[in-house]
Amino acid sequence: MARPPNKHGRDQALDWELSLKDKDKKMRPQVSQHEKLKTRDSGTSSGNYDYSRNFDAIKRISSSLRSEDSLPDAASEKELGNEYFKQKKFKEAIDCYSRSIALSPSAVAYANRGMAYIKIRRFQEAEDDCTEALNLDDRYIKAYSRRATARKELGKLKESFEDAEFALRLEPPNQEIKKQYTEAKSLYDKSNLEKASGALKNSVQEMQKRGKLDTKVNGKGIQPVSSSAQITEITAVQDHTKGDNTNKKQEVKASVQELASRAASKAKVIAAEKNITLPTTAYQFEVSWRDLSGDSALQASLLKSISPSALPQIFKNALTVPILIDIINCVATFFVEEMELAVNYLENLTKVPRFDTLIIFLSSSNKADLDKIWDEVFYNEATPIEYAEKLGNLRAKYCLKR
């Protein structure tokens, strides 16, 4: 029969059991208090969806969406500016348009801010804003109209008239633009008349200073007047005629006006020659082209100042049929001795974005004119063989008869 264990043996057994329990605790993975709470609260197995695990990510997304909704956008700032403008709160409107431009520049926002500047009589800023609007959209009629107003107030009557004229070209039925054009033309013509009168007066005074005479005819002295007046009076005395003083004044006036007219014409040609600048937009090209309309050679010089490859960028979507026909006529007249250059101009015109549309809507007379130019100038027996194929292909692009 076995003996019962003594006290010392029982204590050793107990120590051994406790030791084993401690080791078992260390071997098992520790479960965090957070995991215990999740298990207790969910009351579900690990296979079910754990919402708390994704709580932080959902919170971040929600916060992001709220911050995006609270951010202003260009369109809402522009609309708010329009509301302020209607309430005649022009400075507040300017602030809104400025924020809209900062967020996303647009021709409308620039032109609207320009109009607000006009209302508070800050005309230079208005002109600058309308110019920026036209850099973004060179066919935006309101920008031309508002810039015409700003330029009129700045005393730039020629530029104001040109803007109004171009706006009317874009939208002929617009009655407001018609009225603005009429007013701008009237002011510009009046300014030119005043300048011409001033120049004439100065010219007469200058001639009086330089052409003094102290000649006596029949014992009478001839008073210093303009040289043309002196010639008229001396001739009358020598012929022993006593013309009516009124007739003499009319003759003098006619003679001086003729001289002034010739001088003005010559000055215009010289100014045009010296002021041929490189246009960067369709508007600038058309204005310069019209200014040189009396001299086709100067128009050719203007065209030659532009690289053929720059034509698509200059005209973009603003090329018109009259300008297209004018350019082709100019090339046919002045570029035939430089056939390579002529071909380059004709080729790059076809790359202008609106070219295909313009060709479709050419009138029958315009097409007949182009056919004639092609047959007589560009694509005939004298055409160098190296250009014949290119010109033949271009003829098809211009939708001309073969």
Image (cartoon, rainbow, N blue to C red):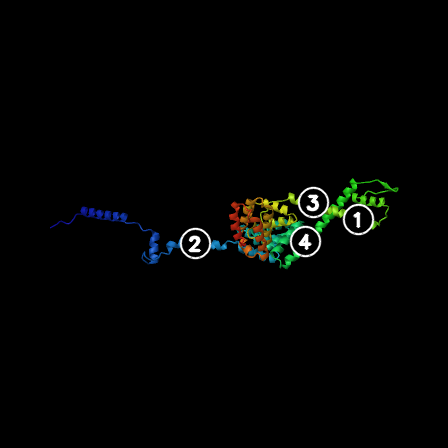
At label 4, the amino acid type is Lys
Which numbered mark, 2 or 3, is in the foreground of this view?
3
Q: On the rendered structure, is 231 left or right of 54?
A: right
Q: Position of residue 99 (x, y in %)?
A: 55, 51
Q: Is residue 93 visible?
A: no
Q: Give the numbered dot on residue 61.
A: 2
Query: In what element is the residue under mark 1?
Result: helix
Query: In what element is the residue under mark 3?
Result: helix
Query: In what element is the residue under mark 2?
Result: helix
Alpha carbon of mark 1 to alpha carbon of mark 4: how far?
A: 31 Å
Q: Which residue is mark 3?
A: 266
Which residue: 63% across, 57% down? 177
Alpha carbon of mark 2 to alpha carbon of mark 3: how far?
A: 74 Å
Q: Is residue 78 visible?
A: yes
Q: Which one is nearer the viewer's eye here, 401 or 338?
A: 401
Q: Which residue is mark 4?
A: 185
At label 3, the amino acid type is Lys
User: In this view, which residue lies farthest toward the front?
Assistant: 381
User: In this view, which residue lies farthest toward the left?
Assistant: 1
- Say whether marks 1 and 3 touch (CB < 8 Å): no
Q: Give the numbered dot on residue 251.
A: 1
Which numbered mark, 1 or 4, is in the foreground of this view?
1
- Which badge, 2 or 1, comes first in the chain's sequence? 2
Query: In what element is the residue under mark 4?
Result: helix
At label 1, the amino acid type is Glu
- Say whether marks 2 and 1 touch (CB < 8 Å): no
Q: Position of residue 198 (x, y in %)?
A: 74, 47
